Amino acid sequence: MARLPLIVGFGGINSAGRSSLHHGYRRLVLDQLSNQDARPTRRGLATLMGLLKNDQVGWNDGSGNTVEIDSYLDSISNALLAGTLIRKLENNLFDPAQIPFNKPISLSGLNDQPVEFLLKRKHLPDPLPPGWQILEASGHHDKVHVLVNDNLDVLLTSRRHSEVNTAGQLPSGFDPDSYYPSRNHPRALQLTVFGASDAIKSLGIDWQSVRDRVAADQIAVYAGSCFGQLDYNGFGGLLQARLLGKKPTSKQLPLGIAEMPADFINAYVMGNLGSNGTNVAACATFLYNLRQGIRDIQSGTHRVVIVGTSEAPLTPEIFEGFTTMGALADDSKLRALDGLSAAEHPAYHRACRPFGNNGGFTLAEAAQFVVLFDDELALEMGANIYGAVNEVFVNADGYKRSIAGPGAGNYLTMAKAVAATRSILGDKDLGNRTYVQAHGTGTPQNRTTESHILSQVAQTFGINNWPITAVKAFLGHSIATAAGDQLAASLGIWQYGIIPGITTIDHVADDVAIDGLDILLQHKTVDPSTLEAVIINSKGFGGNNASASVLSPARAENMLANKHGKRAMTEYLQRRETTLERIKEYDDSACAGHYETIYQFGENVLETKDIEITTQSMRISGQKQTVNLDLPNGYPEYC
């Protein structure tokens, strides 16, 4: 019997803030929440953004008066809103108005004379370029007189203004490298450490207790990025260094590799010895990793899997690459959409407009991680259940006219995801019991192709008024992490019963297919107990398509009761009480600014003496469970 992959923890960081315990989700619907539900997220954002000090119970207003926290949070509410989600590019990563570049020019001497200049002796290139003549510089001991008989080709440092000035940036003032000794790590790896720590802490179960219960080879980590790490501390610096007159560092190449988020989690966060790696599938990377993780649990080879992605693509080069492709919503497109003059500022917070009249997608940075247990382990340890992953389907597009264009594969993944959901829920009233987290990038091509897929699938399965939303409208497109953002938001809907609407548009574009669909333009309040599954859709460049069927926590617990019985569930619920208390303790601590980021550099490193091997098992120091080496023949019929 296949084991059910249960989501028992999740965490991360994106433009909405910290993900665990639904904080990122709550930012999306903050104006719909009661003050009791909104207050922890507002306080958490205030500490995350450096607007509130740790453990502060009052705030000095500058006149010697102490203001209560609630009043202070009210006074900075505009700053909390303005400093989160999609917004105008800030200059903490780079200045979009002063992007450096080198312009090639060719210098020639006057009246056919050589080009002459003085140069410090230590700056002389070796070997000398052809046509250079070096003379002593009279009166300058440290310089030489250079004559160049041919034209002198040089690079002139200049500055340009970015055509795109909006992004889904991490909350203003949040600096991930300040929460652990980052040692010049690329930004995506900084987000990995913060996000993976958040996910593990959200378990409410001490990680050592998990390691004591599960053998080392039954834990897996599948995490990575799409682009790799392209900022200066990663591949970006490696490729730029010599052109900038610098030398590459010893870290830039290894830390730029795409699977490095998994490696960091294994080496510095979890101490994992089990399976690891990443799939790289463009914008569908998170779901590809999720598929790998649930396969391990369903087959019984693993009992615990950490799945995630981390992407930090907000660099001038990536902006320029997508702009050259015509893929991003640049300032001129945004002005044209709203009929603004060149002197007027675009509506940056509305840059991403899925299924509406739009001009391109909006880049974002984010890291998202989920912790999966098999059903038996979750019950044994009293883990809190946020949902269950029913299935993830992956299909390519086949022959294509354009490697970047969408194709037929997403029809397969969506149809199979709905079919897998139907196999659990039955045919009755699927449209009211499920909804779709669309890929919804905000490009003209996506709005027509994805809507047609969703509409055709809805009509095929007899679904009417199928709720469709797209959280990229708020968060932007975090490439590899996009589906992780969608999943984190989905888990919050089951807690609070509000599906975020696509509020950046006021009507659906004329070329969008709508038969069978209810594309939500406003937040929709639902009864979480009747919403039993979500279909998460993801489409990536190159023909990387993935769709996931994720079941609600209520449906998951019902399935567990059917399998394990009423008595087992009663005992589980009793054990879960302790877990819920610890989860609340972590959440309270994090909202107060204590994020407890896990980073164990050089600690508990295993040596040769720490491993004992027999023909039947392997014992590893620090691990209570042995690794089984008495493996059965998997191909007896061949032998």
Image (spheres, grey):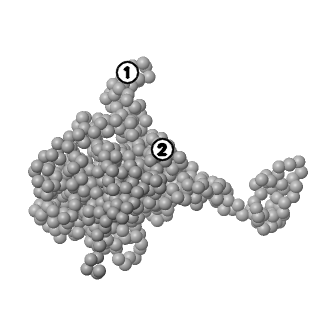
Vertical arrangement, residue 331 with respect to residue 408, above or below: above
- The answer to whether 40 is drawn above or below residue 512 in the figure is above
Disc 1 crowd, CA 10 A, few/some/many (<14, 14-19, 20+): few
Q: Decide if residue 138 is on the left or right side of residue 506.
A: right
Q: CA distance from mark 2 to mark 1?
A: 31 Å
- At horizontal 22% and vertical 61% (from top left) the residue drawn is 3
Q: Residue shown at 25%/35% (left/top)?
A: 35
Residue 359 picture quarter: bottom left
Instruction: Give the residue furthest to the top.
Output: 64
Quadrant of the rendered structure where residue 517 is? bottom left
- Residue 560 showing in the rendered view: yes
Image quadrant occupied by the C terminus: bottom left
Residue at position x 39%, y 19% in the image = 65
Type of the residue with mark 1: Thr
- Residue 573 is left or right of residue 123, and the answer is left
State the count of labels: 2
Q: Position of residue 26 (x, y in %)?
A: 28, 44
SS at badge 1: strand
* Pointer 1 residue: 66
Q: Residue drawn 80% across and 53% down? A: 121
Image spot of residue 57 (x, y percent): 35, 26
Which label is found at residue 152?
none
User: How far across and down, in percent of the image, does residue 444 sit?
Assistant: 36, 64
Q: Earlier in the sequence, mark 2 or mark 1?
A: 1
Q: In the rendered image, which residue does mark 2 sit on? A: 177
Neighbours of disc 2 within 10 Å: few (<14), some (14-19), many (20+): some
Q: Position of residue 362 (x, y in %)?
A: 40, 55
Q: Are marks 2 and 1 in contact (CB under 8 Å)?
A: no
